[in-house]
Image (spheres, grey):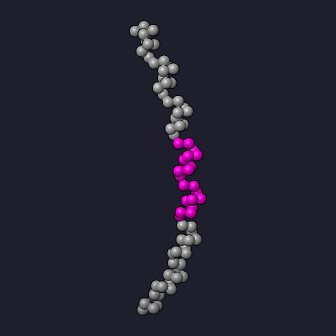
Amino acid sequence: MSAEENEAYSMSAEENEAYSMSAEENEAYSMSAEENEAYSMSAEENEAYSMSAEENEANSMSAEENEAYSMSAEENQ
C-alpha cells in the first residue's frame, strides 16, 4: 500500500477528535465537584443524623443504673 493510500485509510487527527469526546463535553457529562457535594451528605448533616456520643449515653443504661436493676450476687443468694 502506498503512503497516500495509507493516509486515506487511517483517520486523520481532526477526524479522531470529532469522534472522541472533548474535555469540555466530558466535564458536562461527569458530575462537577460542587454537584457531588450537593448529593453527598455534608459532615454536619451526617452528625445530625447519627446519634452523638452524649445522646447515646443518655439512651443506654449507665453501669450504676444497670447494677440497680440487676440483682446483686448477695441478694441472689
In the image, residue 25 above or below residue 51: above
Dividing the picture into quarters, in which one does residue 2 lie? top left
> Residue 5's x, y, as percent?
42, 10
Q: For residue 30: magenta?
A: no
The residue located at (48%, 28%) in the rendering is: 20
Is residue 46 covered in magenta?
Answer: yes
Residue lying furthest left in this view?
A: 1
Residue at x-position 56% and y-position 71%: 55
**Nearer to me, 6 or 25:** 25
Which residue is rendered at x = 47% and y = 26% of the image? 19
Seen in the picture, residue 16 relative to 6 is either above or below; the reply is below
Q: Position of residue 28 (x, y in %)?
A: 53, 37
Compared across the picture, whether 2 is left or right of 52 comes to left
| Residue at horizontal 45 percent and vertical 8 percent from the top | 4
Which span of residues is magenta-colored?
31-50
Image label count: 0
Say which of 63 and 20 sits in front. 20
Name the magenta segment's main secondary structure: helix
Q: Is residue 18 above or below residue 36?
A: above
* Quadrant containing the C terminus in the rendered view: bottom left
Which quadrant is home to the N terminus?
A: top left
In which quadrant of the rendered view does residue 3 lie?
Answer: top left
